[in-house]
Image (spheres, helix red, strand yellow):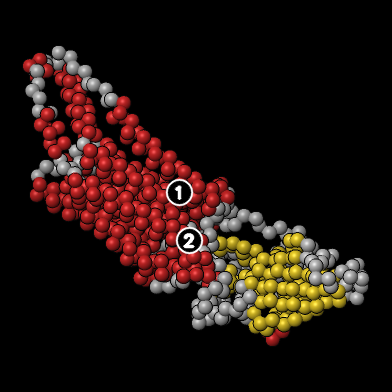
Amino acid sequence: MSATAPSAGPSLIRRPLAAAALLATLVGLVFGLLLAGAGPASAHAALTGSDPADGVVVDTAPKEVTLSFSEAIAVGDDSIRVLDPSGKRADTEAEPKDLSEGSTVRYGVALHSGLPDGTYTVAWQAISADSHPISGAFTFSIGAPSDTTVALPSQEAGGGPVGVVYDIARYAAYGGFVLLVGGSAFVLVCWRGGATALPMQRLVVRGWLILTAATLVMLLLRNPYTGSGKFADAFDLAGLQSVLDTKPGAALVSRLLLLGAAALFIAVLFGTYARREDEREKKDLTFGLAVGGGVVATGIAATWAMSEHASTGIQANIAMPVDVLHLLAVAAWLGGLASLLVALYRTPDIGSAAVRRFSTVAFSSVVVLAATGIYQSWRQVGSWTALTGTRYGQLLILKVALIAVLLAAAWFSRRWTGRLTDSAVASDDAAEEEPESESESVSPDPERAVQLARQRAALTATKKKRIRDADPQRSGLRRSVLAEAAVAVVLLAVTTMLTSTEPGRTEEEAAGGTPSASAPAAGGPVNLKMPFDTGGQNGKGTVRIDIEPGRTGSNDLHVWIDGSDGKPMDVPELKLALTLESKDIGPLPVVPDRLAEGHWSASAVQIPMAGDWKIDVTVRTSDIDQVTIDKNAKIG
């Protein structure tokens, strides 16, 4: 008698496909929004000062230009370039000289002698200690400002199409790591029978493939990502060699070597281990795989810790092992969650004991995440103002909120786990003990026998799937785990964004917002009121100036001019200059932009040092009527 395997009903196929489509859509939406809105990776080392300062006019040509940074950087031959008004190099084109002392990071380049008057442009590009490219430019003038043909670069280092592809690879690498490590741990610790399940094998192998491919892409693009921004330079052998000599390059190569060991681990896990039937031998092999796999997973996690945030800043020796623990806990929780989702939707054999074991693993991972996360947050944020006032702090708040949502979803999953039984699977196994017909058991045709066996296997799988889907406890658990996985996708994306965002502590220190032993005390807003009289018709009025926050670093400056009648007054020209006479700094010119009638504004006005600053204001009310007034104000 010919047997035909029944086709799976539409309802049996639709639910897993719908779940997969939902997750795929969510992944695409989240990463699309992140990559569209994030732009280039934020600089993790910041320029904290320069000599000459940005916008300053000096009487005589300096012998060198020096730049100060908030943390250690790596520089090359062309990391600092000084260009004259015509665009020619004004520096000696030698490698920048390291002038650092103690905690102060400073580099300088020597200038040619006899430089003519005019406006000079300083363009710099380097790599911060946590592997991210940084760049910038500013101008200073000798004698008097002049026109310049130099166009300041509009694209930051690490931006453009190369930066987008590199960011995609970075996100993919974290995702692949989570699937590889979390999926393997799920099989070894929670569900050993999963080693023979094809969906579980595919999940772990795909995690390995994603991580390997992403690492290769990052290694090839590292040179253009930190340099020219051109895809063609990915195959520049000299550039690749220079990358291999850096800490990030060494980390990526180490990761590739460890992934070779991970491939061997996967082959044993889904080969020899899956075929082992003797329980004692399998237990010994489980221990060996757990130790070997743990060493490889720790090594892969360390390639991130040794080259990113944890490797620089305060307490780096403590931060790196803490970061490794944090990454492993993330992989065990989120990777195990993905494995559980696949097992519930794609395999009929996972039992309640395996689900409960994962619940214990997830709880332990959350405890580790909480402990390591609190330490990392303190180290990277440093203050409550940085937590709420910096992009890093705001992303961290979002991450904590997502973890809270994920824990709430996990609570529902834990409730369904408590109700879960294996009765549906057991009754299904009993139902499958059907006697074969005599014609099937003694079929003389081997090909026919193979076909019948395949049909019986398909029939068995379909029946198990139908019974499994009819179990309300398993259906409820699948829905809650799917919700967990959806939140986990967003959480993993936000976590990856944090690795490419400047820590709040360094951002505040670079802006002069975090007082320290070497930083001047923060000041307060400066408010000035100065009457003027240019001597011409309608030449009398009052200048009001606000400088906020009124401390060293970047400030916003607003100017209002009121006429003698108290109403807003427009003037043809308004200029300001700041001078710290006690230190021979300045005048630093400020040319505000007109916002409205009688209101001008300038942003990012740099105050390099605290002190009693003289503020000169030049007001011109006609072609020939002009006056300069001044007033002192304590800033910083």
**Spot occupied by residue 380 in the image (x, y as percentages of width and height):** 44, 67
**Looking at the image, is 255 positioned above or below residue 56?**
above
Q: Decide if residue 619 is on the left or right side of residue 281.
A: right
**Spot occupied by residue 247 in the image (x, y as percentages of width and height):** 44, 62
Residue at 52% from the left image edge and 78% from the top image edge: 515
Q: Decide if residue 163 is on the left or right side of residue 188.
A: right
**Looking at the image, is 282 positioned above or below residue 438?**
below
Residue closer to the observer: 616 or 547: 547
Mark 2 or 1: in front is 2
Quarter of the rendering occupied by the N terminus: top left
Residue closer to the observer: 415 or 244: 415
Q: Quadrant of residue 561?
A: bottom right
Where disc 1 sits, the SS reads helix
**Looking at the image, is 594 positioned above or below residue 11?**
below
Residue closer to the observer: 287 or 456: 456
Residue type of the residue flagged with mark 1: Ala
Residue at 86% from the left image edge and 74% from the top image edge: 540
Asked whether the viewer can see residue 20, the reply is yes
Which mark identifies residue 394? 2
Badge 2 or badge 1: first in the primary sequence: 1
Quarter of the rendering occupied by the C terminus: bottom right
